[in-house]
């Protein structure tokens, strides 16, 4: 795409909004301009407005692993796993045998 095929998009944004979102873009390693381009490409691709982009589960805290889950993940990463059968797992969970 050459310069004649480009369009400059200017918008007024409250300074505090810009600064806060710039920090989030930094976490992704992109610029605010990259973020706007990604947004516009997603609108084009999906023919909709994508509003569910976030770095953490702000509105869905149940998606953040709790301490018990994090401990289990660390155990698996260290190779501390217990092998069991499906039957034993069902028994531990109080499920009927298949």
Image: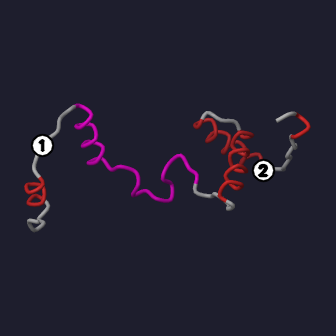
Q: Earlier in the sequence, mark 1 or mark 2?
A: 2
Closer to us: 59 or 2: 2
Quarter of the image containing the C terminus?
A: bottom left
Residue 5 position in % (x across, y down)? 88, 40
* 66 left or right, relative to 91: right
Q: CA distance from mark 1 to mark 2?
A: 55 Å
Task: Give the label on residue 14, or none.
Answer: 2
Residue at 71% x, 55% y is 44
Residue 87 position in % (x across, y down)? 8, 57
Q: Which residue is mark 1?
A: 83
Q: Height in image: 20 above or below 61?
A: above
Residue at 65% x, 58% y is 46
Residue 28 position in % (x across, y down)? 59, 37
Q: Height in image: 92 above or below 55?
A: below
* 9 left or right, relative to 47: right
Residue count near mark 1 (Cα–Cα under 10 Å), binned few <14, some 14–19, many ≥20: few
Q: Quadrant of residue 48?
A: bottom right
Q: Tell me if residue 30 is in the magenta stretch.
A: no
Per the rendered image, the range of residues in magenta is 53-78
Q: Tell me if residue 67 is in the magenta stretch.
A: yes
């Amino acid at each position: 795409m050459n310069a004649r095929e480009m369009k400059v998009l200017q918008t007024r944004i409250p300074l505090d909004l810009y600064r806060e979102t710039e920090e989030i873009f930094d976490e992704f390693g992109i610029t605010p301009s990259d973020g706007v381009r990604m947004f516009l490409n997603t609108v084009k691709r999906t023919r909709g407005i994508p509003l569910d982009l976030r770095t953490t589960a702000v509105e869905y805290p149940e998606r953040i692993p709790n301490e018990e889950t994090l401990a289990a993940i660390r155990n698996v990463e260290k190779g501390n796993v217990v092998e069991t059968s499906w039957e034993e797992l069902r028994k531990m969970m109080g499920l009927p045998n298949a």
